[in-house]
Image (tube, helix red, strand yellow):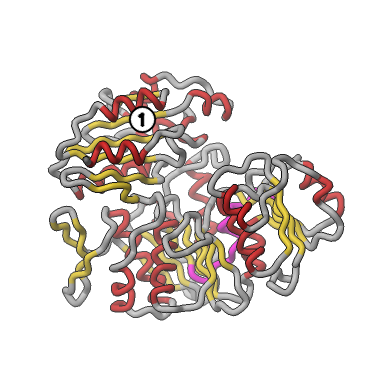
Amino acid sequence: MAPTPTSLQRLHLIATGGSIMHNLALALHRRGAQVTGSDDEIFEPAKSRLAAAGLLPAQEGWFPEKVTPELDAVIVGMHARADNPELLRAQELGLRIYSFPEFIYEASKDKQRVVIGGSHGKTSITSLILHVLRHHNRKFDYAVGAQLEGFDLMVQLSEDAPIIIIEGDEYLSSPIDRRPKFHLYQHHIGVISGISWDHINVFPTEEDYREQFRIFAEMTPKAGVLIYDRDDEQVQLVTVPTSSDVQYIGYGPHENKVRHGKTVLITKKDEEVPIQVFGEHNLRNISAAKEVCKQLGIKGKDFYEALATFKGAARRLELVREGQSSVVYKDFAHAPSKLKATATAFKQQFPKRRLVACLELHTFSSLNPAFLPQYAHTFDAPDVAVVYFNPHVLEHKRLPALPAEAVQQAFQRPDLKVFTDSKALAEFLHQQRWQDANLLMMSSGTFDGLDLAQLAAEVTK
């Protein structure tokens, strides 16, 4: 039976501390389910948020005794291992076990499902759509990979919303289900924002990775819609029309002008719409979101009205602090395509200002010697380019040591600054001349606790 607010009332989440998993726990709790969970590490903000709802496990670790025959189902997160003691216990008891995407699909079987896929841009596109729908008081459910302004949770599941907007991650569904998440949602409207090889630990070749998007594209059902970036060469390879019953819609960057560091959209009626985000990648994201909203019955003028107040998703080219002659932004960018798009957009937005940009290599792919050459010439735009990584992360991921020279060679930038100590990085940044200069910090991590607020205050004073 599909998990609805009136069924599957007793649920246990394995790896409940994850970004999306703890939001699912809170969403289930909010709708009245009895929710328990476990994890071997729970960090902020998940720790405080679970505690406030009374859902924080009493102890970190795995406790098979929590998994009992009385449970209606178990939901397992990707960060658990296949030999997780609680997962093994659930299998032994014959309990219904869901991965996150399986559960979301089951909960939205009777809804129109919009799934946003792509190596980059999917969080921003999903966020844009949610912002527009909420602005116009539409009922909808959602699952998105970032905390959004005005939304207290990253997951919402209800009985009466007719549609659900899902950020469709291509990574694996669970330790016992090796299918990409976005294959499980069975979209009616699908988006592919761009394809750039990632997750080398799962997809060892570019072809393997691209194949997952081809499968997603071909899953578009009769009378379904596939919306895609028409200028992305990799996307073109997988969005070849294969069904006359599917509507294929290609998009490019929205027409625009940049004035005094601010971007203005030009509509088909030659009207100007000021926006709070910038860069060609965001102009493409806007076009994708507009096409989705059109399919959901949102007219162009209503889309632009809502867009004017959109500030972007958290950590996606997010303004930290602004001064008279300097700005500081942070961005989640870490993959080569994201790095290049963000750094280039930033330099183009402020062409007369010096750009100091810092990238933290934090993921398995970004630290892997076999993948590093993918970064060649992706960091050419900044005037000062800095790469940081923690050698302990390499050890934890069981990767070989990474000499600074190898990183410079991979990026094809001899003047690249490479740091492996966050204090030394902070000192270097504090010593820079910040008159008519901007700072861009890019990472899926935290630069090992670097105090960005303090640094931003100094840069913009």
Spot occupied by residue 23 in the image (x, y as percentages of width and height): 58, 57
Residue at 79% across, 63% down: 72
* 371 or 270, nearer to the observer: 270
Spot occupied by residue 249 in the image (x, y as percentages of width and height): 38, 69
Residue at 53% across, 52% down: 170
Task: Answer above or below: position of 62 versus 306.
Answer: above
In which quadrant of the rendered image does the C terminus lie? Answer: top left
Residue at 86% across, 57% down: 69
Task: Answer above or below: position of 110 versus 88.
Answer: below
Spot occupied by residue 273 in the image (x, y as percentages of width and height): 22, 69
Q: Residue 186 lies in magenta, yes or no?
A: yes
Residue at 47% across, 35% down: 362
Q: Quick check: 330 left or right of 69? A: left
- Viewer can see residue 21: no
- The residue that label 1 is drawn on is 387
Spot occupied by residue 95 in the image (x, y as percentages of width and height): 82, 57
Task: Answer above or below: position of 59 versus 397.
Answer: below
Residue 52, by quadrant, is bottom right
- Viewer can see residue 382: yes
* 16 or 452, nearer to the observer: 452
Q: Quick check: 248 left or right of 99? A: left
Bin the neighbour count of mark 1 within 10 Å (Cα to Cα): few under 14, some 14-19, many 20 and up: many
* 107 or 353, nearer to the observer: 353
Q: Which stretch appears magenta?
A: 176-189
Q: Amino acid at mark 1?
A: Val
